[in-house]
Image (cartoon, helix red, strand yellow):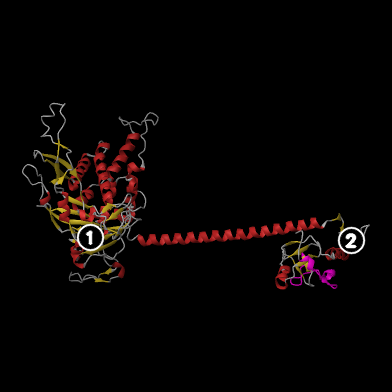
Amino acid sequence: MDRCKHVGRLRLGHDHSILNPQKWHCVDCSTTDSVWACLKCSHVACGRFMEEHSLKHFQESHHPLAMEVRELDVFCFACGDYVLNDNAEGDLKLLRGALSTVRSPGRRSLRSSTGGECTPWVGEGGPQPAMQLALRYRRKALLGKMLRMWISKHQELQNQRKEKLEEARRQKKEVKRRLLEELGNVPPRKSARLLTQAPRSTITLIPRKFRDPPERLPPPPKKPSPLTLSRKAPPNGRAAKPRRYYSTHAVTRRRLAPGVTGLRNLGNTCYMNSILQVLSHLQKFRECFLTLDLCETEELLAKTNHSQGVKGVTGGVVSSGNTPKEPRCSTRQQMSLCHELHTLFRVMWSGRWSLVSPFAMLHSVWNLIPAFRGYDQQDAQEFLCELLDKVQQELDTEGSKRRIVIPITKRKLSKQVLKVLNTIFHGQLLSQVTCLSCKHKSNTVEPFWDLSLEFPERYHSNDKGSASTAYQRSCTLTEMLSKFTEMEALEGNIYACNHCNKRRRKSSHKPLVLSEACKQLLIYRLPQVLRLHLKRFRWSGRNHREKIGVHVAFDQVLNIKPYCCTGSGHSVHRGGYTYDLSAVVMHHGKGFGSGHYTAYCYNTEGGFWVHCNDSEMKVCSVEEVCNTQAYILFYTQRSA
């Protein structure tokens, strides 16, 4: 520091302890290294490279200036830097000369020829300017400061690293604990050893009247238990009744009702869980996939590929250089939604598990249906359509790709499952256009897998007053079906009737005659399972879709005959017109990309309704089901 304001107020005492070499030690720790003497009082203490007692003295007494007794450097604690200037009386210069004489009595002080002022003290190597000494000690101080900062930073990083390691250990222990808790509810997947182990006992969620009676429980093992003791037979040959000692660990596990198995939510996967629960509770759909076992086909395919790569046609060994290697199938090609449905349905309807985590099913969906990859909320109706479409593609291409490998019985089974699957949801619509000029009707048959039903016009108004009035009125499913099959007038003269233009088509130079017409949709062929999609989400603006939250009243039994074409020569219905309610998918919330999906399913094995809310399964009444805000309805055709 060039100028220090505290030096101007310096007043040295006559009997200062700095002039006595016997006092050149710290009064607190008695060290003689890096000793600094206060220029205000007689206090002598060690510097910052030792115990920093001189700094403590400054903090207590507020004496800013101190001098190093050996190097003769002056430091200002208030300014935080070395002092290079002197006061008006030149006290620092005189003090340095006096200390040089005291420390080296054999050496003399140099005086200039012009005046009696003392030059800087002379050592063995000649005079050392005060500027160089100050800079040298300033560099030492800065180096020490940076070293201390590095040590503190290094220590802080060490502590942070230790904290991260401890946190990682705690998280690992927590994950391990959770996995151990879930072992009792998560079914085994690959290990045959785990399949033979007895599952943990779980609390049943089925009412007492729906539980299996004691006589339907599996019989006890024939091998005598070590907890059963028997007496010796008496001499008359009659066997005495054994004395049994029961243990609390030998309690027979009560089986769950088949199908009452929850699906864990893996992150906004409620749309998938609700659809999987519905499909598993549709008896014909479930039976198709329970009979379809693709494991043997996969093993046979692997064995055949292996044998073809090792042996030739005559049985001799073929060299690897002459045989072209077939490219390995990718992971996406090896995955199968049919196989995952088969495995999942087997676990859900085994009556052994109250909770399942559908990891493999979600992984297959992400890879085979990329539109549903990620943890965003999706639409259950779109997922159902995509899933059934992919399953039908797999069953359709399974036989053509592996016709040589798959046995004939397996090929027939796959075709049979595909045929049954196509007839479960597949129906036909009759599109009838009537020309208003000649009253001629043109019929076109179109396939359908579900019916998307529009809400009445009163629920599509943007006026808040009329919308609130419409919401107060009830809406019924039959009203929406009537709207779907009602006669619709086509706007303007846009229909080119074949009957009216029959003669004009022969002469190409005459233009076609366009006339007014009306159109009507009727059910031509009924499916075994009728899917009714209630279009609750409507566009409000350009990029916003809002939900129509009105309750739609529906019955447990549906008569579909009024909405079918029953005229002679038109209707083709193999079954009856009566349908029974099988499942309901419900959307909770107000927005399209948010909310929550649950499902109400009818358990055909136990004859009761169950509310499937991800991992939570709750038995409910049919009245509760009919009071829900339905989004997708599933009706099963009643067998004659």
Residue 15 falls within the magenta-colored stretch: yes
Magenta part of the protein: which range? 6-34
- What is the three-letter code of the residue carrying label 1? Tyr
Mark pair 1, 2: CA separation: 106 Å
Snapshot quadrant of residue 608: bottom left
Which residue matches tag 2? 118
Local packing at callout 2 (Cα closer than 10 Å; few below 14, some 14-19, many 20+) is some
Local packing at callout 1 (Cα closer than 10 Å; few below 14, some 14-19, many 20+) is some
Q: Nearer the viewer, residue 35 or 171?
A: 35
Q: Nearer the viewer, residue 505 or 215?
A: 505
What residue appears at the point 30 percent right and 43 percent down from the top-left corner? 299
Residue 257 visible, this orientation: no
- Residue 120 position within the rendered picture, expressed as x and y whole percent measured from the top left: 86, 59
Element type at mark 1: helix
The residue positioned farthest toward the right in the image shown:
113
Residue 309 falls within the magenta-colored stretch: no
**Can you tell which of label 1 and label 2 is closer to the viewer?**
1
Q: Residue 471's mark?
A: 1
Q: Nearer the viewer, residue 443 or 473?
A: 473
- Residue 600 position within the rendered picture, expressed as x and y whole percent measured from the top left: 23, 59
- What is the three-letter code of the residue carrying label 2? Cys
| Image quarter (top left, top right, bottom left or bottom right) of the N terminus | bottom right
Overall secondary structure of the magenta section: loop
Q: Is residue 599 above or below residue 12?
A: above
Q: Left or right: where does residue 258 sit relative to residue 37?
A: left
What residue appears at the point 7 percent right and 45 percent down from the top-left corner? 567
